[in-house]
Amino acid sequence: MNYPEMTKILKDTLSLRWVPVAVRMMRPGEERPPHTIEPAMPLRHCQSIIVARRGNCLYLPPRSHACPDGSGILGLVEMSPKLKSGDLYLLFKKLPTLEIAQKMIGSRPHFSPGSFQATLVAPLDQASFEPDVVIFTLWPEQAMWLCCAQTYHSGERQSFLTSGFNSTCADLVIQPMKTGEMNISFGCYGARASSEIDDFELYLSVPAPLLEPIVHSLVKLGQKSIPEERKKVYLPPVLDKVGSRRGDAPKGTDTHGVQVFIDEKQCLGDGLCAAFCPSGVIEIKEESGMRKAVAMHPELCSMCYTCAGQCPQKAIQISNT
Ligand code: SF4
Ligand code: SF4
C-alpha cells in the first residue's frame, strides 16, 4: 500500500481534521528530495509540523530552524552552553533548580550533534521521501483507536515516554526513531506557545514501519468497533423500537430488581444478544419452528447493555426497577 492510499484510509477511518505529517531526518550526504521548499523564514520544528499539515513540503537545514533547543536535540547543531546547562529553564521559571533541570535534560532523548543535516516534513500523501516517523494531530478518541490498531496486529499494549518539555522534537521524532515504537505527546511550552495546536488536541507519532499494519488494523476496526463506539451503542437506556413497558415483562424475569425484557415481536432470533452477553443471561429457544431470544437467567445480568447495543432490532430493554 502506498502513502496516499494509507493517508486516505487514515483520514476516512479516524475522521482526521489534519493530514498526518511525514518527517524524515536527512542523513549526511543525502540529496535534498524534489518538490521540497526551504521556508522564507526560520521555523521552529513544531511550527514546521503545522505548516506541513497545511499542505507544504519543507526542507529545513539548520539555518531554517528557529528553535536552538529543538535543533540541538535533533542533532542538527551543537547545543548552546546556556541550554545545555539548564540555566534557561530556571530563567523561564519552567523548572525550580539546576539539579532538576540537569536531570530532565539527561533523561531526554536526543541525537548527537552532526547526526543529521536537515529535517524534511510533508503531508503524508505528498511526501517525496521515505519518512522516519509520521506525526498525527488528534483528539483523544482518535488516539485511542490508533493505539487499538497497534494492539490489533501486535497484541501489545503501548508504553509511552513523554513530558511537557521538548515534545515535537524529543518525544515525537527521536523517541519513536530510537525505540521503533509509537509515542504520544501533549505538546510542550514552546509548541503550545508558538504553534497552532488546539487545547483539546494531542500528538501521536508512529514509526514508518508500523504504519501499514496499523492501517490494515484500522480497516478491520472500522467495520464494526469504531462506528459502534461513535454511536455510543451501550449508552443506557436503549429504547428505540421497544414497544412495551417494563411492567409487561413476563413473570419470572424480574430478579434482584433487574428486568431483561425482550420484545418477541421484534426479535429475529439471530442470537447476537446471546453470543455477546458476557454473563450467559440470554439463550435462544425454538418454539413452533421460530427462534426467539429468552432471558433465562436475569439474576446474572450486570446491566452492561451489550445485548441491547448489539441487537439489530433494538428489541431489548434492561431496567432495574
Ligand atoms: S439480538 Fe435482538 S433480534 Fe437477535 S436474537 Fe437477540 S433480541 Fe432477537
Ligand atoms: S445487559 Fe449485559 S449482562 Fe444483562 S443480559 Fe444484556 S449483555 Fe447480558
Image (tube, helix red, strand yellow):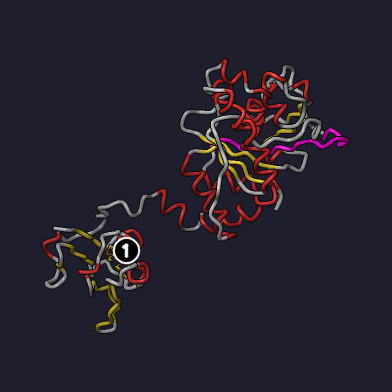
The image quadrant of residue 123 is top right
Q: In the picture, which quadrant includes the C terminus?
A: bottom left
Left or right placement of residue 289 versus residue 138 in this view: left
Q: Which quarter of the frame holds ligand 1?
A: bottom left
Image: 173 above or below 218: above
Q: What residue occupies the far front of the structure in this picture?
A: 99
Q: What residue occupies the far right of the structure in this picture?
A: 29
| Front one among 26 and 165 | 165
Residue 29 colored in magenta in the image: yes
| Front one among 319 and 206 | 206
Left or right placement of residue 285 versus residue 34 in this view: left
Disc 1: residue Cβ within 8 A of ligand 2's nearest atom: yes
Q: Position of residue 200 (x, y in %)?
A: 46, 32
Residue under the image location 23 percent in, 60 percent down = 317
Amino acid tagged 1: Cys
Image: 163 above or below 193: below
Q: Which residue is mark 1?
A: 307
Q: Position of residue 2 (x, y in %)?
A: 71, 49
The segment highlighted magenta reads 17-33
Density class for disc 1 (Cα within 10 Å; few <14, some 14-19, many ≥20) is: many
Left or right placement of residue 161 versus residue 112 in this view: left
Residue under the image location 37 percent in, 71 percent down = 275
Residue 21 colored in magenta in the image: yes
Kind of element beneath mark 1:
helix
